[in-house]
Image (tube, rainbow, N blue to C red):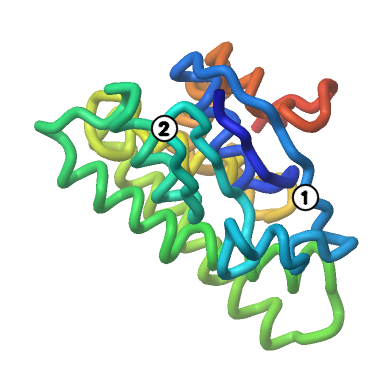
């Protein structure tokens, strides 16, 4: 049994999707970010940086924070989506998501979606970066079925929920045919559909 402390965000969805993909039983504990649950002392004990998601693997008595580390842990435990022969490539694309794709699209959300009109500089800067991310992912996927090669991996699982917020980005997913092909293929996986609705049973990945 995995206890998943999370919220309905792209980083949160990474782990619910992964857990569905590997078929692990899990229980969700909602961390209400708007109410500041992430700063409560009991949560900080398992998440020293006050970030979601966190898992507790009760069978192995392990506590893991940081979504990328959780994906790697679950992949190693299950033996899925993290083939040894492709591991260097997978790690690079997963780290690209962790250090670049997620943080930059997250800033775009803040300036463009949540707080428009408050900073022209911020809106323009992160729109440009986000547009470039779409172009770079599209270029990569023109050469490869998935991000790390021909197989679906934790690099794709980590990146997909961020692109699933394409309606917030106003960049035009349909304008990027390779990224769209990748997005549609992943969005049609049954485990992805189940993981996507882990906190809202009516939520589905938005179509391009």
Residue 60 is marked as 2
Q: Residue 177 in the image: x percent, y percent?
A: 47, 35
Image height check: is 124 above or below 88? below
Q: Residues within 10 Å of mark 1 (few under 14, many from 20)?
A: many
Residue count near mark 2 (Cα–Cα under 10 Å), binned few <14, some 14–19, many ≥20? few
Mark 2 element type = loop
* Residue 109 horizontal/vertical position (percent): 71, 63
Q: From the viewer's perspective, is 99 left or right of 117?
A: left
Picture quarter with the N terminus? top right
Foreground of the two, 17 or 165: 17
User: In the figure, 48 relative to 160: above or below?
Assistant: below
> Where on the picture, by quarter, is residue 72?
top left
Left or right, 169 with reference to 156 = right
Left or right of 160, for residue 84? left
- Circle 1 residue: 31
Which residue, as the protein is rendered here, is positioned at the far left?
Answer: 85
Q: Give the quarter of the figure containing the C terminus.
A: top right
Residue occupying image coordinates x 55% and y 42%: 55
Q: Quadrant location of residue 190?
A: top right
Q: CA distance from mark 1 to mark 2?
A: 23 Å
């Amino acid at each position: 049994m995995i206890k998943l402390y999370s919220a309905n965000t792209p980083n949160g969805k990474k782990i619910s999707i992964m857990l569905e993909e590997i078929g692990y039983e899990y229980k969700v504990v909602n961390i209400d970010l708007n109410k500041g649950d992430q700063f409560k002392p009991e949560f900080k004990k398992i998440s020293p940086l006050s970030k979601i998601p966190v898992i507790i693997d009760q069978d192995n008595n392990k506590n893991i924070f940081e979504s990328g580390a959780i994906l790697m842990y679950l992949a190693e435990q299950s033996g899925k989506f993290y083939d040894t022969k492709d591991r260097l490539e997978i790690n690079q694309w997963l780290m690209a998501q962790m250090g670049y794709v997620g943080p930059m699209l997250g800033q775009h959300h803040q300036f463009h979606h949540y707080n428009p009109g408050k900073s022209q500089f911020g809106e323009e800067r992160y729109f440009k970066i986000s547009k470039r991310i779409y172009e770079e992912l599209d270029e990569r996927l023109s050469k490869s079925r998935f991000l790390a090669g021909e197989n679906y991996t934790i690099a794709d699982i980590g990146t997909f929920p961020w692109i699933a917020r394409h309606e917030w980005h106003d960049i035009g997913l349909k304008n990027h045919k390779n990224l769209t092909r990748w997005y549609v293929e992943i969005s049609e996986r049954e485990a992805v559909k189940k993981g996507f609705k882990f906190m809202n049973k009516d939520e589905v990945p938005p179509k391009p």
